[in-house]
Amino acid sequence: MKTWNDCVAFHGHECGGLTIGYKASLYAIELLKLEFSDDEQVVCIAENDACGIDAIQVMLGCSIGKGNLLFHMRGKSAYSFYNRKTGESVRLVLKPKPEGITREESFSYYQSLQPKEMFDVKEAIISLPEKARLFDSYTCECCGETAGANWIRLAGGKKLCLDCYETYDRFDV
Ligand SMILES: [Zn+2]
Ligand SMILES: [Zn+2]
């Protein structure tokens, strides 16, 4: 299993935020019996995009590229985890820290806590997303570059990539 040192190596520094993601990962591993996700077995939906995300990528193999790290941006220290094999899920919400502690203090504070002391365990409210889909792709009739179907627009009977479409749109009267 990956370690705290692996998380620090990936993230670049030690900090309270990274600790939060690390402990959330450990807790999710325990609660949902997760293993490192080499494909999309584990999905994480994060409600922030701060330091903690890097630990989740390292510990659980949830990553942008595999499509199993998703964002539901709410500015909350909350993470939902899904085990596709068992269908189980959980949402971990960070408990408030003591008032008035400094950055350095919050790092050692979170380091000292057990995962179960740090998070409230709630029900995951967002339903499990579909597996990442592969889209057809088309060649833009303006710039000649290829883009996924999701990012192609029809304008004046032509298939255009979004950048060309926006330019077209701007000059079209
Ligand atoms: Zn950090
Ligand atoms: Zn184009």
Image (cartoon, rainbow, N blue to C red):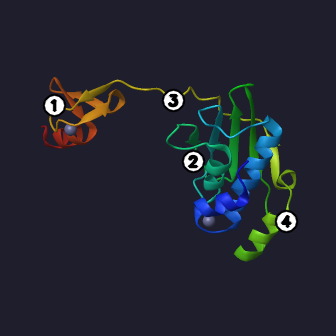
Q: Nearer the viewer, mark 4 or mark 2?
A: 4
Amino acid type, callout 2 = Met
Where is mark 2, residue-wise? 73
Residue 124 placement (x, y as % from top left): 72, 35
Left or right: 17, with 95 as reference point: left
Residue 128 placement (x, y as % from top left): 64, 29
Name the residue rendered at 62%, 46% in the picture: 46
Residue 152 placement (x, y as % from top left): 28, 30
Between 90 and 99, the residue placed more toward the observer is 90
Query: Separation of disc 4 and disc 1 at Cα?
Result: 58 Å
Residue 118 placement (x, y as % from top left): 82, 55
Name the residue rendered at 75%, 25% in the picture: 86
Query: Separation of disc 3 and disc 2 at Cα?
Result: 19 Å
Q: Is residue 73 above or below residue 105?
A: above
Q: Residues within 10 Å of mark 2 (few under 14, many from 20)?
A: few
Which residue is farthest front? 1
Where is mark 3, residue-wise? 132
The answer to whether residue 102 shows anywhere in this view is no
In the rendered structure, which disc, 3 or 2, sits on the residue that comes first in sequence? 2
Say which element carries label 3: loop
Give yes or no for contact between labels 3 and 2 (Cβ–Cβ under 8 Å): no
In the rendered structure, which disc, 2 or 1, sits on the residue that comes first in sequence? 2
- Asked if disc 1 is less than 8 Å from ligand 2, the answer is yes
Amino acid type, callout 3 = Ala
Query: Separation of disc 2 and disc 1 at Cα?
Result: 35 Å
